Image (tube, helix red, strand yellow):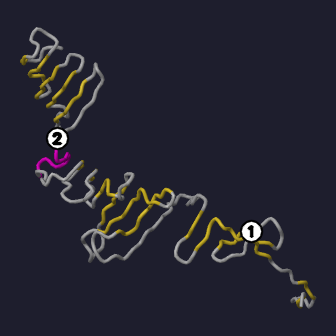
Amino acid sequence: SSTFLAGDSSYKTVSGTTINNNADNRVITGSGTANTLEGEANFTFDGTSIYSQANLKLEHTGDAMRIIRLDADRGAGGNSLGDIEFQWNGNVNAKISGIAGNDTTNKDDANLDFFVRESGSAIARAMTINKDGVVGIGANNNADLGSGLHIRTADSGASANAESDELVLEGTAEVGMSILSATDGSGTIFFGDSGDNGAGRLVYYHGANAMRFVTASTERGSFRASNANSGSLVVGGTSW
């Protein structure tokens, strides 16, 4: 029947509802037409994954945070707890991974690894931030990182001395660090303490092509190429 008996003992007409684009796993939204709903094809769930052809936005209008949570009960250290993948035409070319640590009992430590891919090569780890906050760049592994920043172009097989492992540069051929300045500027390495943040310095001044040596905040000598003592060691705190 197209009518039913309502609570006020009157008969009411039954109205049907139409769902346009009726297909499995689609999100149903409202429509501008009465008694009509829309099956949205750009946001679907296939029982395993949610697919969206639009932006995904998490917003709270109040003073509160939003969370994207990736939770996996993995059983071994080194396993990925969750990945954020960046694909180009179906190829995974970059990703960020949360990697389980070695404490598989408490399960309370992990690394954050960043992977990238070079054309024609497999995706590989480019940077690691481990549980101690140590950053390893270019190593493709997270072993022997030291205690600060470790930049590795290749594995030399050596380990950093514990007294000088806050910054580690590693490779298998020539290894170095560059300080690049303007032609009339200078590059400086500072040695400081709580009483003087520039007590010791090595300074190269490009304007005079000279190298200065500073101790106790006073210049003690320099190698200069712009005066009568060109190529010689000048002792004392003389001016440029």
- Above or below — where is 115 with respect to 72? above
Label 1 packing within 10 angstroms: few (<14), some (14-19), many (20+): few
In x, y percent, where is residue 200? 14, 31
Which of disc 1 and disc 2 is earlier in sequence? 1
| Chain part drawn in magenta | 162-175
Residue 58 highlighted magenta (yes or no): no
Secondary structure, mark 1, is strand
Q: Residue furthest top?
A: 228
List the residue tagged with mark 2.
Answer: 174
| Side of 163 relative to 12 (left or right) | left
Left or right position of 97 against 234: right
Residue 206 percent across, percent down from the top left? 23, 20
Q: Is residue 119 visible?
A: yes
Q: Amino acid at mark 1?
A: Gly
Contact (Cβ within 8 Å) of mark 2 with mark 1: no
- Quick one: SS at disc 2? loop
Question: What label sits on residue 30 in the rendered view?
Answer: 1
Which residue: 16% across, 41% down? 174
